[in-house]
Amino acid sequence: MHFFIRPGRQVPTTQQWINRVVRNAPFGAAYFGAAVLPFAVAALAFAAHRRRRAAAWLAIGAVYVGGVFWLTRSINIPINDAVAGWNAASPPADWAALRERWNEANLLRTVAAGLAFAGAVVMRGCRLR
């Protein structure tokens, strides 16, 4: 999703609202749960001596953590924090560059989340030992 597609003055207002709304327990459970769950499934598979299945779930977890969690923490959250301090009536001169960087990172996060989800769906029907 491109949250920063609005012109100048609307960017900070929209992003500040999103930042306030998204910080809640259901979102946190989904976001952090998606990062932990593949590793938990991998541990269970490893304990059941299903090494290939465990390796596949480790790969799914690595894609999610690297592509979603890490990008969010290293790029999107710092930009969100910067936007939180902006005056909506006069955003900084480089707001468009920050918007582009945020959108690029969000696209990569979306692709990584999609790949991790697709991997989990494939694993549902896979009979790896």
Image (spheres, rainbow, N blue to C red):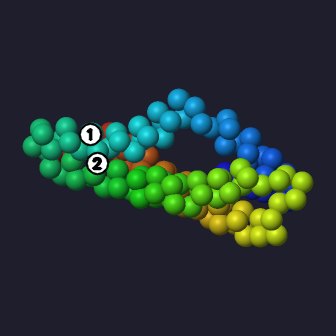
Q: Residue furthest left?
A: 49
Task: Tell me which residue sits at (73%, 52%) in the image.
Answer: 85
Q: Which residue is mark 2?
A: 57
Residue 104's disc number = none
Task: Tell me which residue sits at (80%, 65%) in the image.
Answer: 92
Give the secondary structure at mark 2: helix
Is residue 9 at least partly visible in the picture?
Answer: yes
The reply to whether callout 2 and callout 1 are in contact (CB within 8 Å) is yes
Instruction: Classify mark 1: residues with Cα within 10 Å, few (<14), some (14-19) or many (20+).
Output: some
Q: Residue furthest right?
A: 89
From the viewer's perspective, tell me whether residue 73 is left or right of residue 82.
left
Q: Is residue 106 above or below residue 49?
A: below
Q: Which residue is mark 1?
A: 41
Mark earlier in primary sequence (2, 1): 1
Q: Quadrant of residue 110?
A: bottom right
Q: Amino acid at mark 1?
A: Val
Instruction: Where is residue 55? Give x, y as percent.
Output: 22, 53
Residues 105 and 55: in front is: 105
From the viewer's perspective, tell me whether residue 124 is left or right of residue 98.
left
